Image: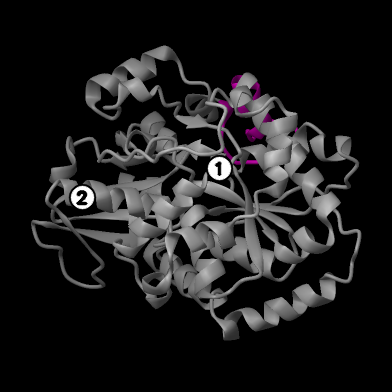
Amino acid sequence: MSMDQFSRRELIKLSALFTAAGALPLLRAYEARAQEADAPVRIGYLPITDATPLLVAHGKGYFEAEGLKAEKPVMLRSWAQVLEAFISGQVNVVHLLSPMTVWARFGSRAPAKVVAWNHTGGSGLSVGPQINSVKELGGKTVAIPFWYSIHNVVLQALLRENGLTPVSKRTGQPQANEVNLVVMAPADMVPALASNQIAGFIVAEPFNATAETLGVGKILRFTGDVWKDHACCVVFMHERDLQQRPEWSEKVVNAMVKAQLWTRENRAETASLLSKEGAQKYTPHTTAVLEKVLSPPDTDNAAYLKSGAIRNAAWRERRIDFQPYPYPSYTEELVRRLKDTQIEGDRAFLDRLDPATAARELVDDRFVKAAVTAAGGMAAFGLPESFTRTEVVVA
């Protein structure tokens, strides 16, 4: 089976999960499992740096320190598998692409909510060595991890700013002013770029770092250099747990917040903890590749400034950073931008969705506010002491 066939099969499967008929068998399985009143923490994740706080919380014993039982996190292959495991109750804590939670909550009325951000930044637009500007992507194909992703939102903003039109074509070549977008599993992107099946991809780390390390691609722009301190993956939990097990839910969030603080101060050690050389083997990535993301040398930053991968130097963005508070302004701006982003499938719910309403109904920030305050406030994460901010997007 080709990578394209696999990606389309997974896309169809994922789309089905966000329909009443497709989710019903899984919801029934969840109802049966929900009788387990003292269920332990069961994390489902993809082997990407987006999952870092949840994996660190497990690896450093923060769940147990909160008095919780926690099983070893379950590594899954695709977003479809993550959603299937979550909806059916096989796992009860997951990290999801932030736009995906908008689709889940309002497109299919999934009984779950965002409780915290997992990380900020942590993604980039990687291209073949011969491409030196966004405009040179005209007439070519670029891979995205999913239609409902910050990657798709940021990429389309970049394309429009450079006079290019995003399209989705099953057959035929895109026109000179078009860029064909295809959904592809993150693990498939580097080999697809190396074999010239695609001209570039925009995705979470460490796949951009992997392409750099292998010499098959380079970073054209970091997403965090386009949307300042944007969320990528967020922590998603069942509404039933939030309502019926509030103390348990609070402790889960406490552990995750403590893991973020530890990660900020121990970036190189985090890379080792997550790597395939680590005791838990949380990911199949080498320590060296993960260090390039989590603890890069200063020379990398200088090179990115020179190449233009970083244009907003004053922002002082980390390649990936960690802070848990889900600013309402981000959710509101995300919904506004999703309305103007090309997305395959039934997206009628977006036309009806009010950004402020979405921010209130999608997010339950009770626990993370308390956890952040207990940890020393937003200042502990190097941020102004406020639970509000203004979104800055510069394509």
Give the amino acid type for the residue marked by disc 2 in the picture. Answer: Leu
* Residue under the image location 25 percent in, 41 percent down: 395
Q: Position of residue 153 (x, y in %)?
A: 34, 53
Would residue 100 be found to the left or right of residue 173 on screen? right
Q: Nearer the viewer, residue 373 or 153?
A: 373
Residue at 83% from the left image edge and 70% from the top image edge = 34
Residue that carries the numbered disc 1 in the rendered image: 50
Mark 2, residue position? 159
- Residue 196 magenta: no
Whichever of labels 1 and 2 marks the residue nearer the N terminus, that label is: 1
The residue depicted at 43 percent of the width and 60 percent of the height is 355
Whether residue 281 appears in this view of the structure is: no
Residue 56: % across, % down: 70, 35
**Render colour scheme:** one colour
Magenta residues, start to end: 266-287
The residue at the point 82 percent across, 34 percent down is 61
Instruction: Tell me which amino acid carries mark 1.
Output: Asp
Q: Farthest residue in the bottom direction?
A: 21
Assess whether residue 281 is covered by the magenta stretch: yes
